[in-house]
Amino acid sequence: MSVDEEYLSTWFVHNYIGQCAQLCSEDITRLFTDVSNVKLQKAISEIVCWRLNTSVDDLWNAVQCAEFKIPATVSVQSLTVRSCVCWINELAKIDKRFSVYFSAVALLHVACKISRNGCNDELMNILSTMLDPDSNQCCSILSQSKIELNTSELLEFLQKSAVEHLTTYRQLQALDFGSVVTIVTTDFEALYAYKRGDYQRCLQLSTQNANALRYADSMSSMLTFAEFIQLMDDDIVSLTALTLIVNPKLRNYSNLFSISQLTLSLYLMIQCQLKLHHSVMSLTQTLLYVKVAQKKHPPHRPLDHLTLKLVERKTTRLLPFSLECRVIFTDVGDHVMPEFSVI
């Protein structure tokens, strides 16, 4: 009864609103040096505006955290029919994006298990839970006995289905977070095209993605857990393995255990250009993009820098002349435009 409105309001200002202000920019924090009624109203209005302006960024960070935690947990704890049902039901309550993403992770996880140890009843039961029962190919695969089952056909089906789910997931990401991060939606599709030997399609998608990401301030990444790395080629698998041998703790950090969409796109571009015997001029232009990407990625992203360095060395070794790339950065509006010259 001794607590009146004035006391309670003052308590909120000093113990709650003031702490919120500490999370804001310095100019907002300074407004709380004087908490008279008029200035307090202005300060609180500024906090509300700041919170609204940063809410999408906060949600994006939460989504990235979940994007890392889901495969990390599945990779360590494996899956059962019961856990799959639990994952699907609980994730659907949080966000529909996560159900789509988990389905892709689960399919890739089963593919990993089958490629290592072959098929068994538990894995087939998991697939029965995860796959669309109305799919003709799904019905055909699930109706076969373990003796009749073509493992390579099953693995291809699981990887293709997972890539379709991951592409849908990227589309949902781009729709909701395109205002705060540049997200290309066909990175998994390009990777799968490369794995299947469709180098022309992979080059087309990767070139489009690299052009979209060249000036991005923030972009999404592809994780290198076993579930995802089966889609990648031997060079990236080897780089990932060597990195983990040197420092196994990298596995615990998403930004250290992933490759950006830009790095992956440039890597696939070079690989496809080499396999399609593109001209020196074409390789040189892509190599210049690689130079820009090396400056763009911070030092604490080892897989990006290792992959870009591999691309650079692999390409320059094949060029018939000594290439020196000079990159001059010129401010143009909100972007940094690279100007290239070849000497």
Image (tube, grey):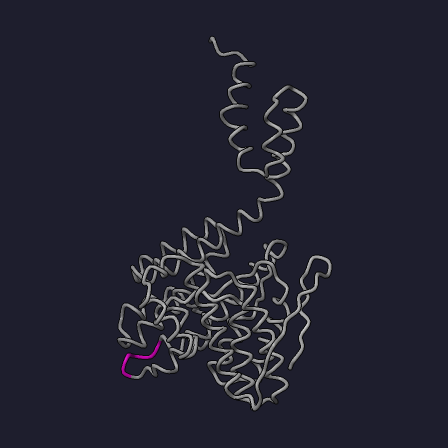
Task: Please check the rendered image and state whether residue 112 is part of the magenta-colored stretch, yes or no.
Answer: no
Q: Position of residue 145 (x, y in %)?
A: 29, 79
Q: Position of residue 175 (x, y in %)?
A: 61, 58
Question: In the rendered picture of this protein, how many numbered marks are placed on residues?
Answer: 0
From the viewer's perspective, is 225 left or right of 271?
left
Tell me if residue 68 can be seen.
Answer: yes
Give the vertical position of 92 relative to 319 (above or below). above
Q: Position of residue 94 (x, y in %)?
A: 46, 49
Q: Nearer the viewer, residue 85 or 52?
A: 52
Q: Nearer the viewer, residue 326 or 75?
A: 326
Tell me if residue 138 can be seen.
Answer: no
Q: Position of residue 230 (x, y in %)?
A: 39, 74
Residue lying at 39% horizontally and 69% vertically, measured from the top left: 108
Q: Nearer the viewer, residue 91 or 285?
A: 285
From the viewer's perspective, is 9 left or right of 98?
right
Kindly indicate the quadrant of the structure image that contains residue 88: bottom left
Kindly indicate the quadrant of the structure image that contains residue 159: bottom left
Residue lying at 44% horizontally and 68% vertically, measured from the top left: 303
What residue span does the magenta drawing correspond to? 143-147
Give the vertical position of 92 relative to 328 (above or below). above
Kindly indicate the quadrant of the structure image that contains residue 176: bottom right
Task: Please check the rendered image and state whether residue 144 is part of the magenta-colored stretch, yes or no.
Answer: yes
Give the vertical position of 29 relative to 328 (above or below). above
Q: Nearer the viewer, residue 37 or 243?
A: 243
- Magenta highlight: main SS: loop
State the quadrant of the C terminus: bottom right
Give the vertical position of 313 relative to 97 (above or below). below
Residue lying at 58% horizontally and 89% vertically, measured from the top left: 321
